[in-house]
Image (cartoon, rainbow, N blue to C red):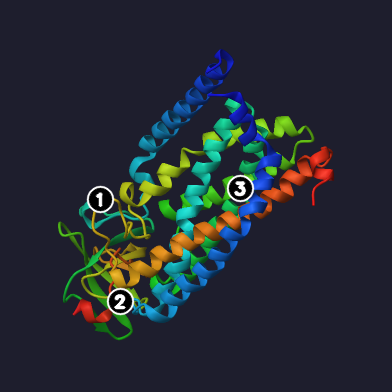
Amino acid sequence: MLPHRKKRLQNILLLLGSSFIGIFLILSALNSQLDLFYSPSELNKNNLPKERIKLGGMVKKGSIKYEDTKILFVLTDFEEDLDIEFDGIPPDLFKEDSGAVMLGSFDGNGVFVAEEVFAKHDENYMPPELSK
Amino acid sequence: MSNKIINKFASAKTYIETCDKYFLFVFIPSIVLIIAGWSWGIFVAPPDAVQGDSYRIIYLHVPSSIYAQLIYWIMAAWSAIYLIWKVKLAAYLTKSAAFVGLLVTFLALFSGSIWGIPTWGTWWQWDARITSTLILFLMYLGLIALHDSFNNQNKADNLMSILTIVGCVNLPIIKKSVDWWSTLHQPASITLTDNPAIDSAMLYPLILCIVSFGFVLISMGVLVSKIIIFNREKNRNWVKNYG
């Protein structure tokens, strides 16, 4: 390789390397702030956040109950559980033992009142016959 | 390496001649394969146990998303070739690919949003995967706009190539976003290391769709590059005598 081309290649590698280091430092500083939601075990039960947050995890098996128009269920990350209350229509894929993400805030009694509930789909795709 | 070979491959004239000679060999399969792939995916493949028929949008979404990232890697390689060897053809191709990349990234975002409404219950969330893909879309747009904003074409080529290379940092972020952070978007169903998490009756048409998208996008890219090259070299004799 001619010297001036070698120099240009070095400049490109330098540019690429410094960009990657820069973005790595930014991302590691932001770290978990880039998460879309909190999982139940990330919250301190004695000092629940007052502001609106997003929570995510699995809907605990056998926990869904209906009370008037409200849906009550337990959200778990298999370490901590949280009681959720939602007055609305969840998406079709919202079901027990399946992932869900919700936006809302805690009432005074440690129950999370969801304003919106989203279903999380996992990476598994299979025909109906095989899922039984 | 002999400079003669490099010069031959670096010539826009040779590139256009080669494309003209072989275009139908890419274009005809692209039409056949995309029709076969989509028909297989839409009419033959079984519905999904959880999502029913709405999952079939993966036959558009997954190929679009794959090429949205792959095209950027290719552009970055061409940009490096342009910056090191000053091969103008590489800059022409980078600009052409940016248009194709813009289109597929739009398709990836759009098809994902359509799928999100019945599946997630929302068409948009600012999670790491969706946001980083939106950034990729804006990068393609920005690269095209940057290049168009200069009268001095050499300066435009240089800056576009440099920015393309800097923008590479976004690609690993898109890829790993679903593993590094909590997102609404699910992790990858097909990986190099594990067995696919998607049943083979659904996977095979998906693979065909991915292959057919390659042919379609190459055809598209060749057509765009012809416009760009004829425009850039319009004062050269070979263009005046073309066809």
Which residue is depicted at the point 57% across and 54% down?
A: B218
Q: Nearer the viewer, mark 1 or mark 2?
A: 1
- Residue positioned 50% across, 66% down in the render: B111
Disc 2 marks a residue whose amino acid type is Val
Type of residue at label 3?
Answer: Ala
Quarter of the image containing the C terminus of chain A?
Answer: bottom left
Q: Which residue is mark 3?
A: B98
- Secondary structure under tag 1 reads loop
Tell me, for residue B193, which label it has, or none: 1
Residue B9 in the image: state x and y as whole percent.
61, 36
Q: Is residue A121 left or right of residue B21?
A: left
Residue density around tag 3, few if under 14, some if 14–19, many if 20 or more, within 10 Å: many
Q: CA distance from mark 3 to mark 1?
A: 30 Å
The picture places residue B65, in percent across and down from the top left corner, at: 47, 57
Q: Residue at x 60, y 24 (%)?
A: B3
Q: Which mark is residue B50?
A: 2
Name the kind of residue labelled 1 in the image.
Thr
**Mark 1 or 2, nearer chain start:** 2
Q: Nearer the viewer, residue A54 or A18?
A: A18
